[in-house]
Every structure is written in structure tokens, then in C-alpha cells.
Amino acid sequence: MIRNPFESFGWKEFGIEIIGQERGETMISLKGRTTLITGGSRGIGRAAAILLAEAGSDIAFNYANREKAALEVKAEVEKKGRNCLIYKADISQEAEAKGMVDDIIDKWRHIDILVNNAGIWTYLEMGAMNADILKETIEVNLNSLFYFCNAVVPHMKKNGRGWIINVSSTAGVRGEALHSHYAATKGAMHALTKSLAAELGPWNIRVNCVAPGWVDTDMCTQVFSDAAFKESVIQSIPLRRIPPPEDIAGPILFLASDLARHVNGAIINVNGGSVLSG
């Protein structure tokens, strides 16, 4: 058996349990916690749902249209012995966001972890702007965060703890031509993360953000169908790889755990070194 590398640090006294030791692995335990993920049927949301379930959390998530994919994720979560609730919901509508939260609270009594993951990536050329696309992007990518945080925070305050993790993008750090509306929502997400970290910290609610670069998800299927473009992306990343969604789920799990108990208001860039900031 590989020796538990955290053993000498007394992590258990802070509520951190290492599981999977019989296989020589370390895994954070989220046993007894519940997680709400927006956009959990595919990509990063799917990977996060499965990984956090493996760590012991019950999972609730919404999907927009892909019921079959959502049911497949639910089955994966339940295979790991965890409970799973799924909702077909439009997160850009405050009433639907609040309805999800109210139903989860009614069934599970608490929401410990909120992962604001759902988002859309569309084109917008300044000078030929489509106002409907702009409005939709702001409603889905940014307004939904306010709706879910506003609905969840009172319950987290009552319980005296909470973990909010926002999934943004390197576009929010460096900007992105022809996607200025998308980049603007992600930059705003960074400001919101820092503001809420300062506001909610006194209630033992930690708010952090994961900012991925390129990820191999179906959101990028169309652009990656161009082999030359995909190779140019690979060459632009110092690690010379486009990561799968699981590589983003890992940092989400870290931030949802007590190993990150003094991390608050952080923007963690997960991009293989392609965009460096700090």
C-alpha cells in the first residue's frame, strides 16, 4: 500500500477523509454533501457530476434538451451509489432556477456545493452585432449565476457552510476576437467570484472559479473538425494537448473539498500554460 501522503498533516481533524487507499490512491471524500451543477448532461458538467459522485456527493443537475444524455449521467452517478436528481430547465429564467433549488431543498434539505457550469459559445462580430445573440449569451452565461447564487446562498448561510465554483474561460482573462460578448460574460464572472468571496466568506461560504482554455467537448466539435485548426491549437498549448473534460473536473473537485479550505476568490487557470496570468 502506498503511504497516505496527507497522513502527517492531520487533515482528518479538518473534516478531510482520504478514500481509495486500498488501491494506493488518494481521493477527497465529499460524503454527506450534495452538489447542484448547471449543465450536467455533457462536457465539463458531466465529468464533474461523475467525479464528485465518485467522491461521495449526491448530485443534482439540469439539462436543456438532451434528455437521453442526462439519463446516462444519472445512471453513472447512481452506479457509484449516490442519489441523483435531474431537471429539464432553462437556467436563463429566474423562476426555473429557483424552482430547481426549492425542489432540491425539499427533497434533500440542503445544497452544499453549487457548480455554475452551463454556458454557450457563439459568434458575434462587432459592427454586425445580433442583439438577440448578445442577450441570450448574457442571460445564460451570467444572469444564471446570479439566479442560482441568490437562491442557494440563504440555505448555505443557514447551514453555516457552502462551496460555490464558477466555470469561466481563459477568454475572460485575455479576451477573444469575434467572441467579445462571450469573453465579457466570463470576465464579469471573475469579478462576481471575487465580490461574492468577500461578501460570503464570513458565513464560511467559499467562492472560487475555474477558467479552462480549450477543452475537447462537443462545444468545440465544429471548430475541431478542421484538422489544421485543431493542430494549431495543440501547438499553441505548451503541454501540447487538448484536455478532456475530466481535466477540468479535477480542479472543481479540489475547490469543493476542504483541501482548499483557505482558497477563496481564486481564479484557477486550467489551460496547459497557454494563457499565463496571476
Image: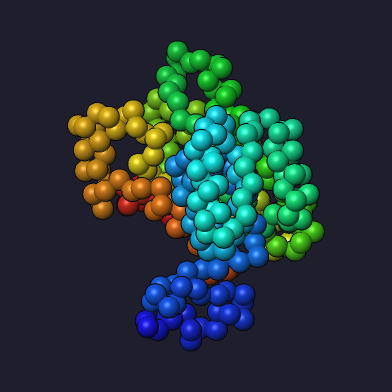
Q: Residue at coordinates 50% horizontally, 28% vertically from top-left? A: 181
Question: Is residue 159 at all visible to an observer of this figure?
Answer: yes
Q: Is residue 266 left or right of residue 248?
A: right
Location of residue 30 with respect to 142 vertically, above or below: below
Q: Residue furthest bottom?
A: 8
For the C terminus, the quadrant is bottom left
29 up-or-down from 107: above or below: below
| Horizontal and vertical percent position of residue 169 | 45, 42
Residue at the location (37% across, 43% down)?
215
Above or below — where is 96 with respect to 255?
A: above
- Looking at the rendering, which quadrant does residue 12 occupy? bottom right
Q: Is residue 256 left or right of residue 20?
A: right
Residue 210 location (% of width, % of height): 49, 51
Closer to the camera, 73 or 127?
73
Residue in the foreground of this view, choosing between 225 and 85: 85
The x, y position of residue 250, in whole percent, is 45, 58
The answer to whether residue 5 is left or right of residue 113 is left
Please name the residue shown 74% across and 39% down the image.
Answer: 98
